[in-house]
Image (spheres, rainbow, N blue to C red):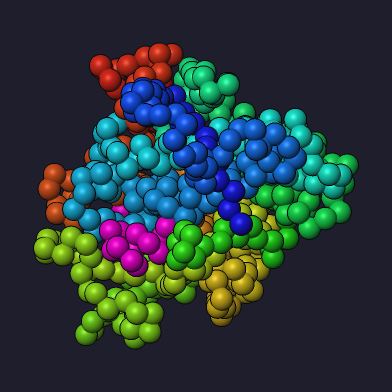
């Protein structure tokens, strides 16, 4: 059951637009009423609008929590979120579209006016503010004993979105809030401080769960917090904390985001398999991640329909018969390459899981000088791939890896394993930034560069972060690099 409620937008032009629209609506209603007999007006209840009075209870507070989880789904695996845009700017996806917003993202040459990225950015803030409102309501109207996990879950959701923002956007992002439906703008917060804030939210959630870890939900939320703590610790360069946090999470653990055609389909399925706006990339960039090539890794199954198409029978079986992507008239755009990880519109997506914990632990152990610990962790996953990697199917065990000996080769091996295991789930962009920030690699070592593979002119840009959207220019606490363009502290990896 979906609970519907209203959460205002973060500080930007949309907040003012919504508020102005409401006022104009009130004026129009007054004008109409002035010409009517009030005793003849028929009163009706609008089922789409929930009176604030209806949520002044424990059940109402939980309704806000459930609504926030719905937005969390939409702004991660259930829509065109930063999970997709990061992969498009990185090396997971190539655009098959005619829309400028996706083309400039694929080219690594973004403008602050990019409307699609702005929508994804707003989604982060909607969820973050929703989690804050849900927490306030749950504290005001406490749940019954044994349901403390619900409050901890909202801390987790907020921490996840703060980390997602820090991984993708430029240095210096605001965390504006709303108090009594009034805007409370935030100044630019450095990326390092965002990671600290996210860890602090995890600390708060963990303290709530400490007294009792008896129920399945307690364990589910606690494991999610540990995996996220490890991910944020990697971003911070705190490899000891990352290893410790990840080590206690079982590989079988998974937090699944549910999807179906009637509610919300998986974003990767929708944008690649349904509308064909994206194409699975193949060796885009110097790291040569062959996500879609003929020697494909079974963790990222793909197909191409038509005579001579790679794995064409699998495309036919899944109902994918259109050879060309959305931009079918541009011959320089490659044919559609469909992904078969989520091959239907109703596949669940594992957002947080024990697989991630093992990969974070392996990277951390390598950075701590213990590749002899990292390699068995990687091979254990290859020997017995978790069932949730391909929903509803299984992956046959993969051949064991051998030690490539040199530090650079070990690094490349770990990031390649992460790339294939975590394809399409929003990890790749942050990892590519860390390859530069923490491992000393350059743009030309890591990112797609030179001649752009779609129409070849004018080539790739040099962006390694997403700019703050122009919609944030209404925030009076953020300086502007030029009129209407919010300034980042910097655009470094």
Instruction: Identify which residue, 452 or 215, lies in the foreground.
Output: 215
**Residue 359 shows up from this direction:** no
Percent position of residue 64, x then y: 63, 41
Q: Splitting the image into 4 quarters, where does residue 375 fall?
A: bottom right
Residue 425 position in % (x across, y down):
49, 55
Q: Is residue 265 left or right of residue 237?
A: left
From this view, report whether residue 406 is shown above or below residue 242: below
Q: Is residue 44 visible?
A: yes
In-front residue for pair 40/15: 40
Where residue 271 appears, as percent x and y from the top left, is 34, 59
Against 29, residue 440 (above or below) is: below
- Residue in view at x 37 percent, y 62 percent: 270
Name above or below for residue 256 compared with residue 44.
below
Percent across and percent down for residue 59 are 72, 44
Question: Is the C terminus in the top left, top right, bottom left or bottom right quadrant?
Answer: top left
For the point 52% across and 42% down, the residue is 45
The span shown in magenta is 267-289
Q: Residue at x 58, y 53 (%)?
A: 2
| Quadrant location of the N terminus in the rendered image | bottom right
For residue 308, side relative to residue 492 (left or right): left
Front-lying residue, 378 or 58: 58
Quarter location, residue 148 = top right
Q: Does the stretch in magenta take in 282?
A: yes
């Amino acid at each position: 059951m979906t609970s519907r409620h209203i959460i205002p937008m973060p500080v930007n032009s949309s907040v003012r637009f919504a508020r102005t629209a409401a006022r104009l609506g009130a004026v129009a209603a007054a004008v109409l009423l002035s010409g009517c007999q009030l005793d003849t007006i028929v009163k009706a209840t609008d089922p789409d609008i929930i009176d604030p009075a209806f949520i002044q209870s424990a059940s109402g507070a939980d309704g806000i929590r459930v609504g926030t989880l719905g937005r969390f789904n939409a702004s991660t695996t259930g829509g065109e979120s930063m999970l997709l845009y990061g992969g498009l700017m990185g090396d997971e996806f190539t655009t098959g579209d005619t829309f400028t917003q996706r083309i400039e993202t694929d080219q690594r040459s973004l403008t602050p006016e990019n409307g699609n990225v702005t929508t994804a950015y707003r989604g982060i803030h909607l969820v973050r503010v929703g989690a804050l409102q849900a927490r306030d309501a749950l504290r005001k109207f406490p749940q019954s004993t044994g349901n403390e996990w619900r409050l901890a879950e909202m801390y987790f959701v907020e921490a996840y979105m703060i980390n997602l923002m820090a991984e993708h956007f430029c240095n210096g992002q605001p965390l504006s809030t709303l108090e009594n439906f009034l805007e409370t703008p935030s100044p630019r917060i450095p990326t390092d401080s965002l990671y600290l804030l996210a860890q602090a939210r995890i600390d708060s959630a963990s303290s709530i769960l400490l007294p009792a870890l008896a129920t399945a939900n307690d364990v589910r939320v606690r494991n999610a917090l540990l995996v996220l703590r490890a991910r944020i610790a990697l971003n911070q360069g705190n490899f000891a904390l990352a290893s410790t946090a990840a080590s206690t999470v079982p590989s079988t653990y998974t937090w699944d985001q549910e999807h179906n055609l009637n509610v919300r389909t998986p974003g990767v399925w929708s944008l690649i398999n349904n509308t064909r706006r994206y194409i699975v990339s193949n060796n885009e960039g110097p790291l040569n991640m062959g996500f879609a090539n003929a020697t494909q890794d079974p963790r990222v199954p793909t197909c191409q329909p038509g005579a001579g198409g790679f794995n064409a029978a699998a495309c036919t079986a899944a109902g994918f018969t259109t050879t060309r992507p959305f931009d079918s008239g541009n011959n320089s755009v490659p044919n559609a390459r469909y992904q078969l990880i989520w091959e239907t519109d109703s596949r669940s997506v594992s957002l947080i899981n024990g697989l991630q914990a093992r990969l974070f632990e392996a990277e951390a152990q390598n950075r701590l000088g213990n590749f002899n610990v990292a390699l068995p962790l990687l091979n254990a996953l290859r020997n017995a791939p978790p069932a949730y990697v391909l929903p509803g199917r299984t992956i046959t065990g993969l051949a064991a890896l051998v030690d490539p000996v040199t530090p650079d080769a070990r690094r490349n091996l770990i990031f390649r394993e992460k790339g294939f295991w975590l394809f399409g789930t929003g990890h790749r962009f942050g990892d590519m930034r860390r390859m530069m920030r923490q491992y000393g690699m350059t743009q030309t070592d890591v990112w797609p560069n030179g001649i752009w593979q779609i129409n070849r002119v004018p080539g790739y840009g040099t962006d390694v972060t997403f700019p703050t959207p122009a919609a944030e220019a209404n925030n009076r606490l953020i300086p502007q690099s030029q009129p209407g363009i919010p300034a980042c502290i910097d655009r470094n990896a």
